[in-house]
Structure formats: C-alpha cells, structure tokens
Image: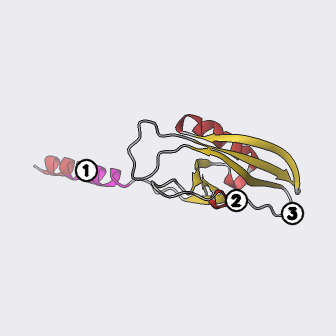
C-alpha cells in the first residue's frame, strides 16, 4: 500500500510539473521606413512593400499568401545593400538567417518576423503604415 501510494504521488507530481511550458523571454525590434542619418553601425530600413497578397482577416482563402518588401541595409549611414525579402512560411528560416547577419549580437536569436499591419477585409493599408517586427530571444 505504501509503495503504491508513493508511486501514485510520484506520477502525479511529474505530470503536474510537465504541464508548465518554459516561458520564453521574447523581445521585439521594429524596422520602419525611417532612417537615422547620425546612427553608427548597421541600420535596417523598410524601403518599400512591393506586394502583400496575404489572406485578409475575416476571409477564408485557399492560399495563405505572402508579402514582399525591399529592406535597405545601412552601415554608418551609408547604403550597403537593398534586399528583397519574401515573407511566407516557406522562406521563414532563410529570412531569420538574413536578419541575424544584420542585427546586433544580442538580437540574433530570431524566433519570428513579419510585416505589419496584417490585411483586413475591406480595409486598405496605406504604404507608409507598414513596418517589420522581428521577435528574438533575450
């Protein structure tokens, strides 16, 4: 009886503690369409959103869609590169690697990245309102 009670308590404790997922400390960096000309080091700027065919909220779509944007890379306020990035599930890993090369060391453990605002049915997004949000582990 004592052994079965001990076994029950052990199994109960293990199952209860196994249910609590480890909370990840995710921080975000926002890439906008503005450049700071006095900033030293690398700076990413959203130059343009070329296309946004993502499925709008409130609509059922066959294809999830994708968004394409041109991102300018500046170093010490001088343009180094313009890169077209396609935001879709199939390009996610490639995008993470590219952003990691151009972000500061403490922001290189990238979890996700996307273009905002997300389209909504019947609402037109103004081009100047777009920005990119990159989530990274702190």
Q: Which residues are magenta?
A: 9-20
Q: What number is the disc on residue 32? A: 2
Q: Secondary structure at mark 3?
A: loop
Q: What number is the disc on residue 60? A: none
Q: Main secondary structure of the magenta part?
A: helix
Give me the residue at 39% from left, 52% from top. 58
Residue highlighted by disc 1: 10
Q: Tell me, yes or no, whether the two marked residues, 2 and 3, touch with CB atoms within 8 Å.
A: no
Residue 53's spot in the image, x, y percent?
54, 43
* Category of crowding for the residue at label 3, using alpha-carbon neighbours closer than 10 angstroms: few (below 14), some (14–19), many (at least 20): few
Q: Secondary structure at mark 2?
A: loop
First in sequence: mark 3 vs mark 1: 1
Farthest-out residue, left: 1
The mark lying in front, picked from 3 and 1, is 3
First in sequence: mark 2 vs mark 3: 2
Residue 50's spot in the image, x, y percent?
67, 45
First in sequence: mark 1 vs mark 2: 1
Residue 71 vs residue 12: left or right?
Answer: right
Q: Secondary structure at mark 1?
A: helix
Compared with 59, 124 (above or below) is below
Residue highlighted by disc 3: 37
* Category of crowding for the residue at label 2, using alpha-carbon neighbours closer than 10 angstroms: few (below 14), some (14–19), many (at least 20): some
* Category of crowding for the residue at label 1, using alpha-carbon neighbours closer than 10 angstroms: few (below 14), some (14–19), many (at least 20): few
Give me the residue at 27% from left, 54% from top. 13
Residue 37 vs residue 121: left or right?
Answer: right
Residue 31 on the magenta segment: no
Q: Disc 1 and disc 2: Cα gap in Å?
A: 52 Å
The mark lying in front, picked from 1 and 2, is 2
């Amino acid at each position: 009886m004592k052994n079965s009670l001990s076994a029950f308590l052990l199994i109960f404790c293990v199952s209860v503690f196994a249910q609590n997922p480890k909370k990840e400390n995710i921080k975000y960096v926002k890439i906008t369409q503005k450049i700071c000309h006095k900033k030293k080091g690398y700076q990413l700027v959203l130059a343009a959103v070329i296309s946004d065919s993502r499925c709008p909220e409130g609509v059922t779509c066959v294809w999830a869609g994708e968004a394409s944007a041109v991102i300018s890379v500046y170093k010490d306020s001088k343009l180094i590169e313009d890169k077209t990035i396609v935001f879709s599930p199939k390009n996610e890993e490639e995008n993470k690697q590219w952003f990691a090369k151009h972000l500061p060391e403490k922001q290189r453990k990238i979890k996700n990245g996307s273009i905002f605002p997300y389209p909504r049915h019947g609402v037109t997004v103004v081009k100047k309102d777009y920005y990119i949000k990159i989530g990274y582990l702190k």
